[in-house]
């Protein structure tokens, strides 16, 4: 329901009048023109979905954009209106899974390459171990620095890193609703601008925009706001670390 409402909001803002799910159906029935039109029209959506998955800005020159494009094409071909909640939510899920699989594969390939080099000689193995120890130490330091930076960002909004576990919704459905709201804010320049300027959630606008009660938004406002701050920041390690508190 949240994503459906958000889709309508974004369509009104961009001036689109065609129903995206009807366009998807036309593309599934063999309309190459409609498929090409969807891929062009939703390029900003692809970049935003890729950004949320990769924690960095993506453009047409990045491999991740091509993967996101392939994920969107797959979503168009496989979307089933009778089974899936909304096309945009389904497409975002497919793109996210494709990119996460890609990132994991890249990570494994990098590690395998390091191990292969390390096996050539004992000296190379020792060097590899030394580099590994250095990398781990640097990772600890980088994570500590990200926590410090995130704590500073949270403090500006009257929040703290230590209370995130306490304010995280306990049930998966509640976390999913809260994260949907965070994604909606991050994907809207207007809502994001107001959130950063006023240092609080635009609860009244959110309540009108989505089918969620003010009481529910208020209950999870700290968690939603913390996730908005995190997604708007350049803190990739924390984004990965906090996935345990976020729905897949």
Image (cartoon, rainbow, N blue to C red):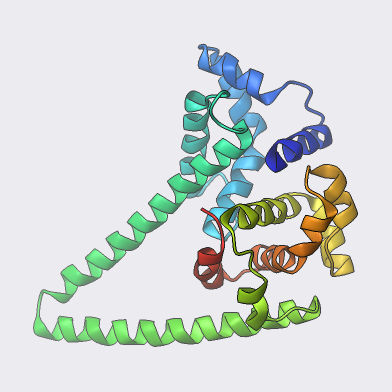
Instruction: Classify residue 214 as left or right of residue 146.
Output: right
Q: Residue at x 58, y 24 (%)?
A: 81
The count of marks equals 0
Q: Residue at x 23, y 81 (%)?
A: 128
Please tell me which residue is depicted at 13% across the width and 86% down the height of the picture: 123
Q: Quadrant of the N terminus?
A: top right
Asked if residue 106 is positioned above or below residue 226 in the image, the reply reads above
* Camera sees residue 63: no
55 or 244, nearer to the observer: 244
From the top left corner, tell me how far across and down residue 222 is, in percent: 74, 69
Q: Nearer the viewer, residue 98 or 116?
A: 98
In terms of image quadrants, where is residue 154?
bottom right
Left or right: 153 with respect to 57? right
Q: Is residue 43 visible?
A: yes
Question: In the orientation shown, which residue stands out farthest toward the left?
Answer: 121
Which of the 4 quarters of the picture holds residue 122?
A: bottom left
Looking at the image, is 206 positioned above or below residue 144?
A: above
Query: Residue 41 placed where, x, y %?
Result: 67, 30
Out of 244 and 102, give the one closest to the viewer: 244
Residue 111 x %, y %: 28, 67
Q: Is residue 77 above or below residue 154?
A: above
223 with respect to 209 (left or right): left
Q: Position of residue 22 (x, y in %)?
A: 65, 18
Q: Residue at x 69, y 67 (%)?
A: 223
């Amino acid at each position: 329901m949240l994503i459906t409402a958000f889709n309508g909001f974004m369509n009104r803002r961009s001036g689109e009048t065609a129903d995206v799910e009807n366009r998807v159906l036309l593309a599934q029935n063999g309309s190459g023109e409609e498929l090409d039109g969807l891929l062009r029209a939703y390029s900003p959506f692809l970049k935003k979905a890729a950004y949320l998955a990769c924690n960095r800005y993506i453009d047409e020159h990045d491999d991740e954009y091509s993967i996101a494009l392939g994920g969107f094409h797959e979503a168009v071909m496989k979307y089933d209106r009778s089974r899936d909640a909304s096309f945009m939510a389904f497409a975002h899920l497919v793109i996210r899974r494709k990119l996460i699989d890609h990132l994991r594969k890249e990570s494994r390939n990098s590690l395998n390459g390091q191990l292969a080099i390390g096996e050539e000689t004992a000296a190379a193995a020792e060097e590899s171990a030394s580099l590994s120890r250095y990398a781990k130490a640097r990772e600890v330091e980088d994570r500590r620095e990200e926590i410090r930076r995130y704590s500073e960002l949270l403090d500006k909004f009257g929040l703290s890193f230590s209370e995130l576990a306490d304010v995280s919704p306990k049930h998966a459905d509640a976390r999913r609703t809260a994260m949907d709201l965070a994604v909606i804010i991050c994907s809207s320049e207007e809502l994001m601008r107001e959130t950063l300027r006023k240092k609080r959630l635009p609860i009244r606008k959110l309540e009108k925009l989505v089918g969620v009660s003010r009481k529910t938004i208020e209950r999870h406002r700290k968690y939603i706001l913390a996730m908005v701050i995190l997604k708007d920041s350049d803190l990739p390690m924390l984004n990965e670390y906090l996935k345990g508190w976020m729905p897949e």
